[in-house]
Image (cartoon, rainbow, N blue to C red):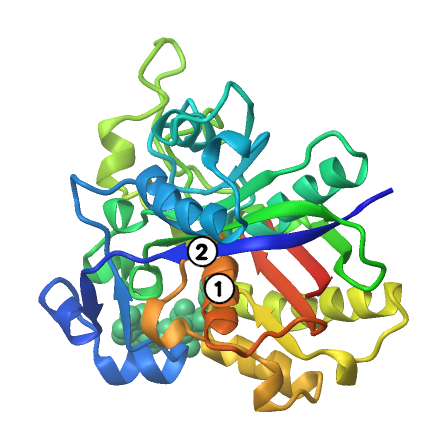
Amino acid sequence: MHKSKIAGIGMYVPANVVTNNDLLKYMDTSDEWIQERTGIKERRYAHRTEETTTTMGVEAAKIAIERAGITPQDIDFIVFATLSPDYYFPGCGVLLQRAMQMKEIGALDVRNQCSGFVYALSVADQFIKTGMYKNILVVGAEKHSFGLDFTTRGRNISVIIGDGAGAVVLKPTEKENQGILSTHLHSDGTAAEILAMYNPGTHANHWLNQKVADFNENEIGDMFMSHDMIDKAQNFPFMDGQSVFKKAVVKFPEVIMEALAANGLQTTDINMLIPHQANLRIAQFVQQKLKLSDDQVYNNIQKFGNTTAASVPIALCEAWEAGKIKDGDLVCLAAFGSGFTLASALIKW
Ligand code: COA
């Protein structure tokens, strides 16, 4: 069985920088509140009409493919992670395949929110290990700014989120001491509703303790997206921030320790931890709990906010470009998010 290695990595963030103070014109918030609670100073918002989740993914993919020393026509499978797709369906994978004029290869979309990129990487890793594919493009991209509640009602989540994309090319490696050592995936559906966008959807309140939208059960057709849902802001993400925080600080260290234990390694062996950029306070809590030094953890949420499925590859790419990840380093990727989902990967670079 082959191991897989990251042969090329790229990232793309939109040019439009939105500072905390820029948000004051939409909602009652403050630079001080946002920085103190989340560490975020600014984020990027995609161009409203000229950029989509897929086009940003394409920009990141071009760089990753070039750095891997191949062309888009050499890619033999796409895994695209996003929670903000261009269309409800079809997924972004096929749009990227078309935009990059790739062969008629398989394109799989992964919907695991903030853990999406690490899940996608794990899927790609299995295909390389079995020898089924040789050059897999894994993308995490999000255009959130199109679908956030920019009023005071939605401020707890809207101030956190940003747009961007990251991508890697996975290839087989013959080297004994290189590549993805293991990936670890988990879910806890008991917390599915603490961070969610309820509508449009087909649930018709089925899973919810309280009625969130009115339906006329005798009518057919208006239940997917109604005026009532829009009036109640259910077309925007909902987050119970404190519950998410409490779960994250317990589960995040667990999935990192699981990855280390599976490989007989210790926290001191980690050269670089790339945590999902959810909130600087959560990343700092994890760092303290695992007794990692500042040099062992990379954070860039201050500049980009939480870009969900794009956050891990963007941070990984920046850290690598800055020379903070070198050949032979042990890199740990870890993510948690809506679902509740959890994922980690250990990579010998
Ligand atoms: N600006 C100013 N005030 C805000 C605000 C904002 N953007 N968002 C919320 N508030 C207010 C609330 O309305 C509340 O006001 P009140 O006391 O008058 O009712 C007050 O701040 C405290 O709200 P609370 O939700 O208890 O704040 P918090 O300390 O839990 O911080 C988060 C909020 C969202 C920063 C925090 O819960 C968090 O980081 N959670 C995890 C989020 C996360 O990681 N999400 C991504 C998962 S992938």
Q: Estimate the x, y position of residue 60 in percent, counting from the top left.
A: 40, 50
Packing grade of label 1 (10 A; few <14, some 14-19, many >=20) is many
Residue 86 in the image, given as x and y percentages of width and height = 33, 33
Residue under the point 73% across and 68% down:
256
Q: Is residue 52 left or right of residue 288?
A: left
Closest to the observer, 61 or 184:
61
Mark 2 or mark 1: which comes first in sequence? 2
Which residue is denoted by mark 1 in the rendering? 317
On screen, residue 34 above or below 66 = below
Instruction: Pick whichever, 13 or 155, lies toward us.
Output: 13
State the residue at coordinates (62%, 66%): 247
Quadrant showing the N terminus: top right
Above/below status of 98 relative to 212: above
Quadrant in which the C terminus is drawn: bottom right
Q: Residue at x 46, y 24 (%)?
A: 202
Q: Quadrant of residue 179?
A: bottom right
**Residue 235 visible in the current orientation:** no
Kindly report the distance in space between the C-alpha atoms of the residues bearing marks 2 and 1: 6 Å
Residue tagged 2: 10
